[in-house]
């Protein structure tokens, strides 16, 4: 894992408590790929993220990125337009991955999980291991939630499984300014390491706002 810091501002203190939008993304089924396929998936995901960011008018060069082999956790700058990031970037990533998979006939397809949360982040010196605080933990737990992993099983044609924290759902998705429709989100709760997390999974394919019993079992169970 490595840290790609945003451009430094020498006038700022070395340790700060900030409130920022965080994004976490992860490649589905990464460990099942061969080493060569893992490397290609990394390159493809980076290309997809860059393309989706450009479509949304975002500059990924201003994001502090904590990268790992199968994804990244990014802290967005203070002036990031949250409505655009949630409502435009996420659908753009779905379109980009769909096009990449069609164009190159990938097997397995490149599919990803994507999570958003807004909250407190403690930023340390450039040599630190990454952002600390509650927000990075929350967005990482939501990304790893079993219901989100199972979403891509329930919806095999989708390329991105998107989840937002309860706070982002209430304050951004339900604001009336976001391009994503609140009725297309479903509430999930998951318990990881004894702590409960509440999020909303984006499911635009949900017919009539209802789900069947099989989907209910796959998408709302808790894990420990």
Image (cartoon, rainbow, N blue to C red):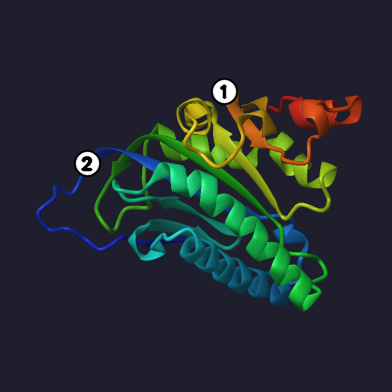
Residue 73, placed above or below residue 98: above
The residue carrying mark 2 is: 16
Query: In whole angstroms, how far apart are the C-alphas of marks 2 and 1?
Result: 26 Å
Quadrant hosting residue 82:
top left
Quadrant hosting residue 31:
bottom right
Sort mark 2 into few (<14), some (14-19) or many (20+) by Cα contacts within 10 Å: few
User: Which residue corresponds to the image point at 62% horizontal and 31% vertical from the top-left?
Assistant: 200
Residue 180 appearing in the image: yes
Label tally: 2
| Residue 217: % across, % down | 84, 27
Residue 67, placed above or below residue 102: above
Mark 2: which secondary structure?
strand
Residue 13, placed above or below residue 17: below
| Residue 201: % across, % down | 66, 35
User: Which residue corresponds to the image point at 59% horizontal and 73% vertical from the top-left?
Assistant: 43
Mark 1: which secondary structure?
strand
Q: Quadrant of the C terminus?
A: top right
Q: Answer whether labels 2 and 1 touch (C-beta < 8 Å).
A: no
Left or right: where does residue 120 sit relative to residue 101? left
Residue 185 appearing in the image: no
């Amino acid at each position: 894992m490595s840290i790609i810091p945003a451009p430094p501002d020498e006038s700022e203190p070395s340790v700060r408590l900030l409130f920022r939008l965080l994004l976490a993304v992860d490649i589905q089924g990464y460990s099942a790929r061969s080493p060569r396929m893992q490397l290609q998936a990394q390159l493809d995901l980076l290309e997809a993220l860059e393309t989706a960011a450009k479509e949304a008018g975002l500059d990924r060069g201003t994001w502090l990125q904590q990268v790992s082999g199968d994804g990244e956790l990014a802290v967005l700058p203070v002036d990031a337009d949250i409505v655009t990031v949630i409502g435009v970037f996420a659908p753009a990533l779905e379109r980009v991955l769909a096009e990449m998979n069609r164009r190159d006939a990938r097997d397995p397809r490149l599919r990803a999980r994507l999570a958003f949360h807004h909250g407190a982040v403690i930023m340390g010196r450039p040599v630190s291991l990454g952002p600390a605080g509650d927000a990075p933990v929350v967005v990482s737990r939501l990304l790893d939630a079993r219901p989100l992993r199972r979403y891509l099983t329930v919806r095999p044609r989708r390329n991105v499984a998107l989840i937002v924290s309860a706070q982002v759902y209430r304050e951004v998705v339900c604001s009336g300014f976001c391009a994503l429709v609140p009725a297309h989100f479903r509430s999930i709760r998951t318990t990881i390491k004894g702590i409960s997390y509440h999020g909303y999974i984006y499911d635009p394919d949900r017919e009539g706002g209802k789900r069947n019993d099989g989907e209910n079992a796959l998408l709302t169970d808790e894990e420990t």
